Image: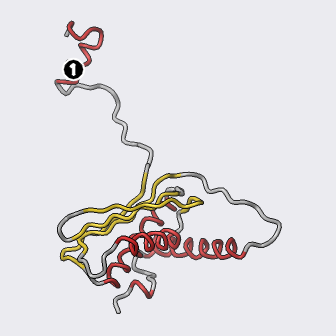
């Protein structure tokens, strides 16, 4: 123990599994993500898009629960041969709104997916947490009004799903055709 100086005894105790420091289980969230691995490879574009919608809604909901807003939206895509690609883009304004996450992830997916190529896994993630800042205006901004309506709708959906379960309200586009 003397070979390691004043920290020698601490190193010896830890090497034996002895550590009297309190256990800390909390940590700062750096990203929120959700992914889906298919039991069989999927090449049906409608199913893939429905999955991206569901994943985006899950990520958005988890972010709203923890009051997080992110600027970086990330797509994870794994082909049938297990080759994994990730693509990401940055938003101008941090968000936790499922619609914004979904529209962004859909653009990334369309730019990455090779038509008809089977997919094994899809993932959606958001990181780069920041505080959303809005420029105030003297005139009503139609985009801001639309965003506020979307936020109210999303809050109502979250409340319903929290109370009655995730499947209580679903988008028609998420249902099988």
Q: Residue at x 43, y 49 (%)?
A: 30
Answer above or below: position of 45 versus 166: below
- The image quadrant where one finds the N terminus is top left
The percent position of residue 116, horizontal first and vertical second, equals 27, 82
In this view, the residue in front, 106 or 69, is 106
Which residue of the protein is positioned furthest toward the bottom in this rendering?
Answer: 177
Q: Residue at x 43, y 74 (%)?
A: 106
Q: Please state if 71 lies on the left or on the right of 6 as rendered.
A: right
Answer above or below: position of 154 versus 82: below
Q: Secondary structure at mark 1?
A: helix
Q: Residue at x 21, y 6 (%)?
A: 2
- The image quadrant where one finds the C terminus is bottom left
Image colouring: secondary structure
Residue 69: quarter of image: bottom right
On the image, numbered disc 1 is attached to which residue? 13
Residue 32: quarter of image: bottom left
The percent position of residue 148, horizontal first and vertical second, equals 65, 72
């Amino acid at each position: 123990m003397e070979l390691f100086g004043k920290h020698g005894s601490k190193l010896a105790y830890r090497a034996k599994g002895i550590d009297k420091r309190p256990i800390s289980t909390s940590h700062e969230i750096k990203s929120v993500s959700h992914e889906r691995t298919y039991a069989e490879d999927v090449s049906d574009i409608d199913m893939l898009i429905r999955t991206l919608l569901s994943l985006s809604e899950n990520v958005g909901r988890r972010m709203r629960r923890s009051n997080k807003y992110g600027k970086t939206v990330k797509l994870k895509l794994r082909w049938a041969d297990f080759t994994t690609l990730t693509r990401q883009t940055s938003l101008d304004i941090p968000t936790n709104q499922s619609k914004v996450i979904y529209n962004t992830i859909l653009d990334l997916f369309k730019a990455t997916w090779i038509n008809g190529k089977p997919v094994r896994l899809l993932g959606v993630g958001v990181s780069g947490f920041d505080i959303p800042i809005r420029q105030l205006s003297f005139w009503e901004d139609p985009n801001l009004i639309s965003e506020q309506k979307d936020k109210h709708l999303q809050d109502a959906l979250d409340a319903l799903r929290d109370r009655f379960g995730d499947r209580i309200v679903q988008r028609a586009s998420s249902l099988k055709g």
